[in-house]
Amino acid sequence: MAQPLVEALQKKLTENCYPFHMPGHKQGRLLPLFLEPFQGLFAFDLTEIPGLDNLYRPGGPIKEAQEKAALTFGAAATFFLVNGATAGLQAAILASFCPGEKVALPRNCHRSILGALVLAGVEPVYVTGPYLPELALPLPPGEKEFTSLLNHYKKEISGVIAVDPDYFGISPPLRKVGEKQIVDAAHGAHFPFHPSFPPHPGEKGALFWVHGAHKTLPVPTPAALLHLGDSRKKEDALRALALVQTSSPSYLLMAALDGARALLEEKGEKLYSELAERVHELKEFIRRLGLRCLEEEDLPAGYRLDWSRLYLITADAGICGTRAAAWLAEKGFQAEIANAGGVLFIFSPADSREDMGRLAAVLEEMMFSLEREKRSLPAPSLPPVPSLSRPLLSLREVWFGPRRRLSLREATGKICASFVVPYPPGVPVLCPGEEITPQILDYLEYLQKEGIPVAGVEDNTIEVTE
Ligand SMILES: Cc1ncc(COP(=O)(O)O)c(C=O)c1O
C-alpha cells in the first residue's frame, strides 16, 4: 500500500547525506541517554530538506500523502496536524468565521474550541444536549437541539460546531444544519475503517471536521487530521494552519499519519472485525459478572455508540467508578477515565485477545475484592438547573480583562470569569461573561452541600471580572 511520505523519508535515508542542518540530534547521532535505544527512529526526524516537501506549501510527498488520506477519510481535502486536534479546531474556526460572529456549540464542548473562539473573537451561543439522568450522562446535542436554536436566533448565528462522537463514543443524530458546520470528531478517527462504526461527519454535511488521530489510531501524540468537506476552503485552511501550528512540523508525526492510513486502508476492516469480536466477548463476560455496560439501546433514538469504547457502569453493582478505576490501576490496568457511575475503557486493534482476557479476569477479581465496599449508589438526583444567564461580556473581553476571586455570596450580580462545572453532569452552569444570579448561587450551594464536585469553585470562591 503506497505511503508517499514514509517512502520519501526512507529514500532520503538511503542517500546517506550528512545532515549539516536542523535538528541538533543529527538523525540520532547524539541523544539523551534514555533515548539512545531509539536512535533508528530519530533518523526519520528530518526537516524541510529537498525531496521532503513543505507542510504549508505542499507539492511533493506531503501533498500526495494528504491526498491519499482525503480519499480514505472521505474528505475533499485533508491536512496533517502536528499540534493536536486543538490546532485543527482553531484553524477551522479561524477559516470560517469573522470576529463578532455568533456560532452555536455544545455548552460542554472541549476547551480547545473555547480557546479557538477567544483567538478568533467569535461569540458562542451554547446548546445543551439531552441528559440521561439514570447514568448522569449529558449527551452531545444533535440535529434537533441545533435546529431549534438556529430557528430561535434566525439569521443571527453564522455556523455550528458539533461534537461527534463525544468522549464516551456517543454519536448524535446530525445532518447538515448550516452552511458552516464544523465537527469536533477528535474521538472518531477510526470510524472510516469499519462499516459497523457510526457514519463520520463527512457523511453528515460537515464543512470541516477534525480527527484527534492519536486518540485511537496507531500514531504518536499529538498527531491529528483536519478534513475539509469543500475543497474551495483549502487556501483559507492552509493560511489558518500556518498561523496556529509550529513552523517546524515533525516529520515523525506526519509520516506516522501517512503510514497508519496505509496500514488501516489495507488491514483496517479485518483488524476492527477481530477487535469487535473481542469486545463482544468481553461484554458478554461482563454481563455474566452481573455488571452492565453503556449500550446503544440506552441512548435516545438516532444516537449511535462507538462499540470500541466500553463504559462499565459499576454504580449498578454498588461500586463507585473512581474507586473501581483506582483498584484496577493498582492491579496494573489503567482505564481512560472514571466518574462516580463507572469506568471508561478505550480499545484499539493493538489490544490483543490476551490483553482483553486479562482485563476480564481482573474485573471478575474486582467484583469479589470490592464486595465489602459495595453499597447502594443511586445516581445523584440533581435539582433542575436554574435558568442560565445570557452573556454580558464576550469570551474575549473576559480573557483579556482583569479578574479576581470572591466568595460565592459576594459574587451575586457579578460577571463570571471562568467555567463553573458540576460533575455530574459535566455541563457548565456558568460560562465566562455570564451574570452570577442568586438562583445559580443557590444551586451551587446546594451542590456543595450534597458533596457534588464543582470545577471552578475553590474554597467557596469563584472567579469574577473586575
Ligand atoms: C472532544 C475533544 N476535542 C478536542 C480535543 C483536543 O485534542 P488534542 O489533545 O489532540 O489537541 C480533545 C482532547 O482531549 C477532546 O477530548
Image: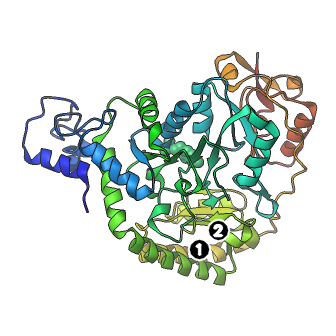
In the image, 37 versus 273, the foreground residue is 273
Report the side of 392 relative to 307 (left or right). right
Per the model, the C-alpha gap separating discs 2 and 1 is 10 Å
Q: Which amino acid lies under the numbered mark 1 shown in the image of this protein? A: Leu
Q: Which residue is mark 2?
A: 312
Q: Against 374, is 234 above or below?
A: above
Whether the residues at callouts 2 and 1 have beta carbons within 8 Å, the answer is yes
**Tag shown at residue 363:** 1
In the rendered view, does 342 fall on the left or right side of 64? right
- 166 w.r.t. 421: above or below: below
Relative image position of residue 99 (x, y in whole percent): 62, 23
Percent of width and height locating residue 74: 45, 56
278 versus 82 height, above or below: below
Q: Quadrant of residue 169?
A: bottom right
Residue drawn at 59 percent across, 74 percent down: 363
Kindly indicate the quadrant of the structure image that contains residue 318: bottom right
